[in-house]
Image (cartoon, coloured by chain):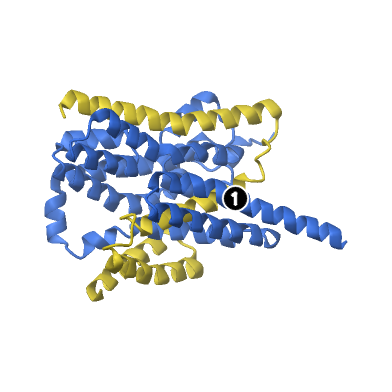
Amino acid sequence: MSAGLLLLLFLVAGVGIYLMRFLPLLVALRRRERTGQEDSTGSLLPLVGPAVVVALLVTSLFPGGSTTGHSAELVRNAAALVPTVLVALRFGNLGLTVLTGIFAYALVSLAV
Amino acid sequence: MRNEVAEYPSFTQGLGASIPVVIGYVPASVAFGVAARGAGLGTTEAVLMSLIVYSGASQLAIVGLVAAGVPWLVTAATALVLGLRHVIYGPSLAPHLRGFTPRHSALAAFGLTDEVFAVAASSLPHRPAGLGWMLGLELGAYVSWALGSLLGAAAGAALVEALPILAPALSFALPALFVALLVPMVRATPREKTKPIVATVLAAGAVATTLHLAGFQAWSIPAAGVAGPALGLLLAKTTANRGQEGE
């Protein structure tokens, strides 16, 4: 692919993704401004955050999209997940939890 | 008169909130840089893609499809489908954003990635924020993503060779970040809302896993983001109705 086409590809993808981030935010803020209150989905929205984060977690644990050929990786992820969750529950510190996860995964990788 | 704007967290506090995202982004963006070079892109092209597209999943898809020689329109369409999940982020955060004009929205929307959304969604319900905090959070994430891409593209192969154990371990940074964000979200829930949150998390997890393993990766996150809360809300309403009947 030529450099020009590559740049066009980046621009189309970049602008498209930007609009998917921008337009729904703009519409939601305008609706709130117009009605002076949260819209009818207000009670649903507090649940969206945890739902999306758990979905992001799940998809990041299955990077290949399939368990076929990824069993060792799944075992490593599952084993590293245990101390990560425990540290998150005990300390609730984002940085410490991330570092624990990385360290735990490195240790598990030596064994599995 | 009290200055209400001053009560919102500042740009610097937003920058501080970006630290966990930075820890997650550096290894992920280095991995992207390495993959981009492996696919035949130059260092400048890899960094440009991170600066313009700024979406990990879409960027990795582009790298894979470019390497496979897929036409650019198909590649662009695939990247856009993968980006569909972003449409639910703005409306979810909007109730907690303060003093946002359309121009502010245009600025803040650019950096609204998965991880930025996750940090904001865990923080804003307890402490609403204005543009300053959002931009601080997003700037930290954006700079780390761009610099990590540069590092990966320019020196990633040598880095991986020098630290063979560390390289795969760093890939666990993002799952660990999501755990770190999810646990306080669930724990901070008021007692009466525990059941809906747990139902939401379980339903979203089940939907995301099923779709992801079935090969519908692009749809797994938006579907979970809709189905999970719908079930949680249904449970909350059912519980409330039972409570009224029992009175």
The answer to whether residue B126 shows anywhere in this view is: no
Q: Going 19% across and 23% down the picture, which residue do you hit?
A: A4
Q: Residue B166: which quarter of the image? A: bottom left
Q: Is residue A64 above or below residue B117?
A: below
The answer to whether residue B135 shows anywhere in this view is: yes
Residue at the extreme bottom of the image, as rendered: A111
Amino acid on which disc 1 is placed: Pro
Rendering coords of residue B10 (x, y %):
50, 41
Callout 1: few (<14), some (14-19), or many (20+) C-alpha neighbours within 10 Å? many
Q: Going 79% across and 60% down the picture, which residue do you hit?
A: B242
Rendering coords of residue B138 (x, y %):
41, 40
Residue B158 is left or right of residue B107, and the answer is left
Residue A2 is left or right of residue A112, and the answer is left
Residue B57 is left or right of residue A85, and the answer is left
According to the picture, the residue beneath numbered tag 1 turns out to be B229
Q: Colour of chain B?
A: blue
Rendering coords of residue B39 (x, y %):
16, 42
Read off the chain for label 1. B
Q: Secondary structure at mark 1?
A: helix
Rendering coords of residue B124 (x, y %):
56, 46
Question: How many marks overall?
Answer: 1
Q: Is residue A36 above or below residue B125?
A: above
Q: Going 30% across and 43% down the picture, which residue do you hit?
A: B145
Q: Going 42% across and 45% down the picture, which residue do you hit?
A: B114
Which quarter of the rendered picture does the N terminus of chain B lie within?
Answer: top right
| Chain identifier, yellow in the render | A
**Which one is in front, B139 or B79?**
B79
Residue at the extreme right of the image, as rendered: B247
